[in-house]
Image (cartoon, grey):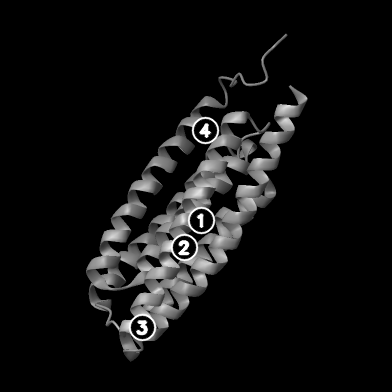
Amino acid sequence: MKSTLTTPSSVRPSVLLIFVFAVASILLTLVQWQFCQRTGSVLVFGQGILQLILTVILLFFCLKPIRKWQLLAQLLISFFVLLLCGLLMNESYIRWEEGSTVLTSEALPVVILGFGGLILLSRLLIQFKEEHFSALSRRLTGSLFPVLSGSLAVVLLITHLTGWYWLDIAVAFFTACLLGIVAIFFLLDGYWNIMESSERT
């Protein structure tokens, strides 16, 4: 009987690409956390979490049929993203209480570069082995996530021009709540799919 966990050779390049993207996204999120501490802008960290959510969606929607390693990766990354969302909410609350200022002149180039990189990577991922991408994943990677990332850049630009540092904190807190809900959905979805696959075997 042929194993359902065997990866066809035609899919292996896509698996490798997603793996590289996942590792790069995690490392980039850690770098953006350091920039968040340096500049005081929690939106920088929020953009890193957004990239991790994109990784979960790529793992879930891009390769068909769904395999057990994808479900496990989805479960682990979703849990990690949920922890990061909690950290972002806590950091936003602390900075709100302290009334911290934001070095927008240093944070803005980081967010703009992250926005541009997310657009470029989204387009490349859609064009690479397009037959493995569903219509929903193309809409998410090609439209929704660049728009969200661009919105963070616009908010930081407004903060830079107006000096309304509370705007950076408030939008980051809202972003953490929104991404946390998405992470919970993927966490529960991965858990139930793993349980169903275990029952079938």
Q: Are marks 1 and 3 in contact (CB under 8 Å)?
A: no
Q: Is residue 133 left or right of residue 27?
A: right
Cα distance in 3D space between marks 3 and 2:
17 Å
Dot placed on the residue nearer the N-terminal end, 4 or 1: 4
In the image, residue 58 sits, relative to residue 174, either above or below, namely: above
Kind of residue indicated by mark 3: Glu
Cα distance in 3D space between marks 1 and 3:
23 Å
Cα distance in 3D space between marks 4 and 3:
45 Å
Q: Secondary structure at mark 4?
A: helix
Q: Is residue 145 left or right of residue 41?
A: right
From the viewer's side, name the closer residue of 31 and 194: 194
User: Closer to the camera: disc 4 or disc 3?
Assistant: 3
Q: Which mark is residue 14?
A: 4
Name the residue beneath numbered marker 2. Answer: 86
From the viewer's side, name the closer residue of 17 and 86: 86
Specify the quadrant that holds the C terminus: top right
* Residue at point 53%, 60% (across, down): 145
Q: Are marks 4 and 3 in contact (CB under 8 Å)?
A: no
Kind of residue indicated by mark 1: Leu
Kind of residue indicated by mark 4: Ser
Name the residue beneath numbered marker 3. Answer: 97
Residue count near mark 1 (Cα–Cα under 10 Å), binned few <14, some 14–19, many ≥20: many
Name the residue beneath numbered marker 1. Answer: 82
